[in-house]
Image (cartoon, helix red, strand yellow):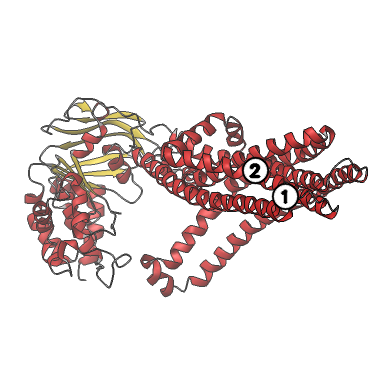
Amino acid sequence: MLSRLKDADKFGKTLIRMLRMILQAHPPTFLGLILLTALQALTPLASAWVTKLLFDLLALVLQGNPSVDLWSDLIFLLLVQGAIFIIGQVCVSSTMYLNNELGRKLAVLTETSVYRKISSFSGIGYFENPEFYDTIRLASQAAQFGPLQSLGILTGLFQSIITIFTFLALLLAFNPFLAMLVFLAALPQLWLQLKFSRQRYGLAFDLSPDERRTFYISYLLSAVETAKEIRLFGLAEYLLDNLRALYHKIHQARRRQELHELQWKLALETLSSSTFAVAFGVVAIQAFAKRMSLGDITLYINAMRSLQEGLSSMFSAIAGINEQILFFTEYDRLMELPQPIPINHSSRPVPKLSHGIEFRKVSFRYGENQSWVLHNLNLFIPANKTLALVGSNGAGKTTLVKLLARLYDPTEGEILWDGVDIREFDTDELRRNIGMILQDFVRYAFTAQENIGFGQISRISDLARIKRSAEIAGIHPMIENLPHGYQTLLSHAFGENGSGADLSGGEWQKIALARLFMRQADMLILDEPTAALDAQAEYEIYNRFTELVEGRACLLISHRFSTVRMADMVAVLENGSISEYGIHNDLLARGGAYARLYHMQADRYRVS
């Protein structure tokens, strides 16, 4: 956290970027806001001056001055004061509207940029780092609320500066000592506000992991995906106790900070009030000496109070801007993160796979201080063939898939596509040539058409192709029977009047398979593709498997040997490397790890 505060000290660049972003959101609105703020800042001085004239008029009347046309002068001054009041109120309302309008445009601009940046990361290394999620949360918070709050603070600061200069000039003309006394008495507030802003930023960063955990527990208590298990295991009270403990910890930390601030603020307010009392005494002495009129007295008292309030507002605004900039450094930090894997925007096309994919002496670990997941691994996936990858949990199968899809790069070694290192290809084009269904595939709360069309986003409107993919996966008849067919939302979370639909695990697996078949890829990766299917559905997939993968290389990962037997070749992954490679019957005859795993599973189906 200290390193973050040191980075945040260099906030000039961040402030300029924030101001440029505010201007970029909508220049006419920004200009109108500045003009209205300037006009609003001048109304207190105008009002104070008219008040002075009113009191001077009253003094002349009390003195019995016959030259005063009381009613005409009084009506004129009251009309002017009323006009100033109306102008001030119009400025306040209009400024509020323009501030909100510009804030909304800013929020859209900055928040979409956050998620565009997150989506731009070609690899997924950051997503497995807990600190990255703290950066995302703080950056999203800064993007969503920072510009709007900063805009309000900046306009308030601009208004305060105008107010301060006008009343300071007035007081300097009356009594320079008095003006400097009020000004200097307010300076400690600036130092204190800046100190508090840094402390609040540090506290927000320290509490971020706990706050993320409260969001997670809240999700567990309210999500449809977890509702059944929470009730079956009676977890609600346990989770609520955890939630209460986290809230208590967060609230205690914030309470300590706020009490610390309160003590200092009370001391400063005492100093401020004492200063005003001294200044008031100076004005009173001048009044008793008959060196000023009744109107002058009200004018200078209003000037002192307005200057004091203006300085307080200005210093609070400066501290507020400092705090927003501190938080906005998290937005900058996210925006400046480099790609987790080197991106090659090569024009070299990815050739149609004719020979195969080779892992050559590949080793990988997730961090320098972590153990090796894969070590000196050699593996060949021939073109137009299916290779089954078998291994126990934690053997490294999922890591191997991540490397093949270039979600990570090997720590050592290389992965070759027809003899060419895949790092030499454009990453997006490489992935367009790879179709993948993962074990933890996403169940999108979108329509059936979109859920399947996501497999080839450029063809998401091609309903004929989507239906063909659904037919291949065996899910087309079920979709046709949904309330709105392919336009049915596959979730009850957003469907109106019961228009959504919930699918079973097996049906979702078929949706994921259909999504896979949307992509005309040379390489297919199927991670437990039949895990949620019933025996009949798996049998249908088995009978059509050769047709489904025809003309493509396929990497098949499964713990079910009924699925593994669909493959042409089998590789066994043990201790981070390939221990066995061959066809099913040969590996059984060899009596090694594959045979042991196969017979272990087969024994469960034998009748004694």
Q: Which mark is residue 23?
A: none
Side of 600 relative to 101 (left or right): left
Task: Name the spot of residue 410 as percent of width and height, x first.
Answer: 33, 32
- Would you name the residue on which mark 2 appears? 197
Q: Residue at x 20, y 25 (%)?
A: 347
Side of 100 relative to 570 (left or right): right
Callout 1 environment at 10 Å: few (<14), some (14 to 19), or many (20+)?
many
Amino acid residing under circle 2 = Ser
Task: Name the spot of residue 546 as percent of width and height, x first.
Answer: 8, 50
Q: The residue tagged with tag 1: helix, strand or loop?
A: helix
Residue at the right extreme? 289
Q: Residue at x 63, y 58 (%)?
A: 251
In front: 494, or 503? Answer: 494
Vertical position of residue 431 compared to residue 448: above or below: above
Q: Is residue 74 visible?
A: yes
Amino acid residing under circle 1 = Thr
Side of 89 relative to 345 (left or right): right
Task: Name the spot of residue 473 as percent of width and height, x first.
Answer: 13, 57
Counting residues from the N terminus, which is met first, the one under dot 2 or under dot 1? 1
Task: Name the spot of residue 594 as percent of width and height, x first.
Answer: 23, 49
In front: 304, or 75? Answer: 75
- Would you name the residue on which mark 1 appears? 51
Vertical position of residue 281 compared to residue 234: above or below: above
